[in-house]
Amino acid sequence: MNNVFFAKIDGPELIANKVFEAGEKWFNDGIDVGDYVFVHPNNRIQSNDKTIYQVSELWRAKKWVSPTNPDNKKLAFELITEFNPQINTQEKFIALKLFKLNLNLLNQCLNPVIGKCFFKLELASPKCLDIIADKTKILNYINKPENYRKVLILSSKKEVDSFSEDVQLYKENGEFKLFPASFINKKDIIDKFKSDNYRVGKTAGNVKGKFYKAIDKGETEITGEKASLKGFYDLFCSSNNDLSKISVKKRDSFVEWLKENGVSGAAKQYENGLRAIEKEFTVNIDDEYAKNKCVSLLDKLSNNHKVKISKGTLSGNQRNWESYLKKYIEYKNSKSDDEQNNIEEDFAQKVDQINKKISEELNAKGYLSANTIFYGVPGCGKSHEVNNLLHIGKSFEIDDSLNDKFYKRILFHPEYTYSDFIGQIVPTTKEESISYEFQPGPFVEILRDALQDSENNYFLIIEEINRGNAPAIFGDIFQLLDREEDGCSEYPIYNKEIVKFLQKSIPETQKVCIPNNLTIFATMNTSDQNVFTIDTAFKRRWHMTRIPNNFNNPKDPLLSNENKIAGKNYSWKEFALALNTDIVANCNDGMIAEDKLLGIHFVKQSELKNVNAFAEKIFMYLWNDVVKYNKELLFRPELKTLDKVIEKFIANENVFNDKCEELLKLFNNSIENKPISDGENNE
């Protein structure tokens, strides 16, 4: 596949001849025969007191010209088309939907560079090459406004169109977020996007200032001059916007370091040398350092490297440039450890702040420093409630969610034991000798973490607590669940192995107790069959919180009446409410009917789209669990097997008995409103 490049050509003779030497000053980025080039003549057009750069022609690399000197090859190009009018690089060219957004597009296409420079552009899709390769297609393409990217300012993430080719910013918790579309480079732009940068936009001029003003005026679709994607990048992604550096020149700290290390008079010369290197090679030295500590850049700055002075034929030796760069690398190396420590300290501080915020919310709700079981029917959202309380999961951003160092999540099951939960003594081999050491389980691990870090709160989450033999799994730890008013265990215990383990980290440990910065959450289904019974003595030590089976949550897309079951004229919400009503009316024969109700998330969105999957899941539960001993409480008496029930339901036949009034209404209504299929007569 051929590639596409952007070229900055200096001089009308070069543009006319279209033959280039592959010399040191030619940054070819891997260009070869068959590749296409958008040509920007390196001259400036002044209009209304502003400088304009334009793309004038489209070329194709035709052939390598056999040189006398094999180290100085030449590449000849042919003209595909001229652009008349020329394409403004800032307002139009970089906004073409032909290209992916990256730094080559947003920076190299706009920054003037003396000499001949070719930069590879990344296509948005393979079909874009077909447009570029055809003169008629490319001319038609650039003349259509819909082929240029806009910047859309959306009020919420719900408004995002995942198929859009425009840049989409949306508000969330008062901050801008960038939708990570596939055409936006992750490393160059997405990873560098910072909403905080927006705050300093109003102090900036040029493209960044114009972009800021457009947003500040409340424009929701920013196009034309104000939509410069370079303005978007400079405002939200450029490291120069960092609030801590906004009033500091780029390398002031380097100059100060030089003075402190015995380079005083020439300090400014070093800084200017670095800027000359960046201009010569069109690079950012800090980026080069991050990439490979400037190894590749040092290679270019060899002692024998010569460059042409921009005006004249004199040669200049870059030996000084090499020494300048080596000094800067020494400076960066001296700072890297400190910077890494600062990053780690800042991250730890931020993590602690989030933990404190979440702890304050839990304390206000009465959950902190306690043991709480969340119970309810299958699918009512118990684990979801725990996640929300602790800010865990996809619904929370990294910068406001609980760090995983502060919680452990485990699942009880019939084979889960005290040894799994608390720990056990296991043999270990050291230098051909066998010793026996206590291997801690998740409870003892998080107990140690909480005791070591009294400034933060820790959380143990036990899923399905009644699927294991909870009293046996807790064993002697059962005694610690009784808590004082301050949240600490009322009755500490002595457990030799746990004490010895804790003494490795906390030497003063003499007894085992749950501290007030360790909170325990558990979930429990009320209708599970074949599970262990939790006795009253165990339950007494827990707060019990019922999760209501609420079908009226407007924010839950699963509960929309528009969310129909595949092949039916009724939604999951309508079906579940009707079924739950009839279960309560018909099945309360000494059993607790509420234990058998369907929870709001008993099924998933994907199962609603497949009627077979939906029927298999729902009717197996109803048949084997809800009416296990008397099928006719719900189903028609002639349906003797589960297979028949599922078959009839899929065929849109009523499977429920006449006592199921709500389900019967739903079924009859769906039949009455069933659209006539193409195979039926419509007279």
Image (cartoon, rainbow, N blue to C red):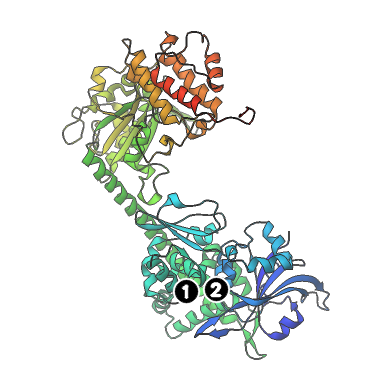
Q: Residues within 10 Å of mark 1 (few under 14, many from 20)?
A: many
Q: Residue 410's spot in the image, x, y percent?
A: 39, 31
**Residue 376 lies in quadrant:** top left
Which label was assigned to residue 182?
none
Please identify the quadrant where the C terminus is shown: top right
Is there a contact, CB below 8 Å, between mark 1 and mark 2? yes
**Residue 515 lies in quadrant:** top left
Secondary structure under badge 1? helix
Q: Amino acid at mark 1?
A: Val
**In the image, residue 471 above or below residue 8:** above
Report the side of 137 relative to 505 (left or right).
Answer: right
Q: Residue 152's spot in the image, x, y percent?
A: 47, 60
Q: Earlier in the sequence, mark 1 or mark 2?
A: 2
Please indicate, yes or no, whether residue 637 appears anywhere in the rendered image: yes
For image coordinates 40% across by 44% down, the residue present is 395
**In the image, residue 183 above or below residue 15:** above
Please identify the quadrant where the N terminus is shown: bottom right
Residue nearer the viewer, 73 or 75? 75
Question: Which residue is label 1 attached to?
Answer: 207
Please indicate, yes or no, whether residue 423 appears anywhere in the rendered image: no
Report the side of 135 relative to 502 (left or right).
Answer: right
Question: Which residue is label 2 attached to?
Answer: 90
Q: Amino acid at mark 2?
A: Gln
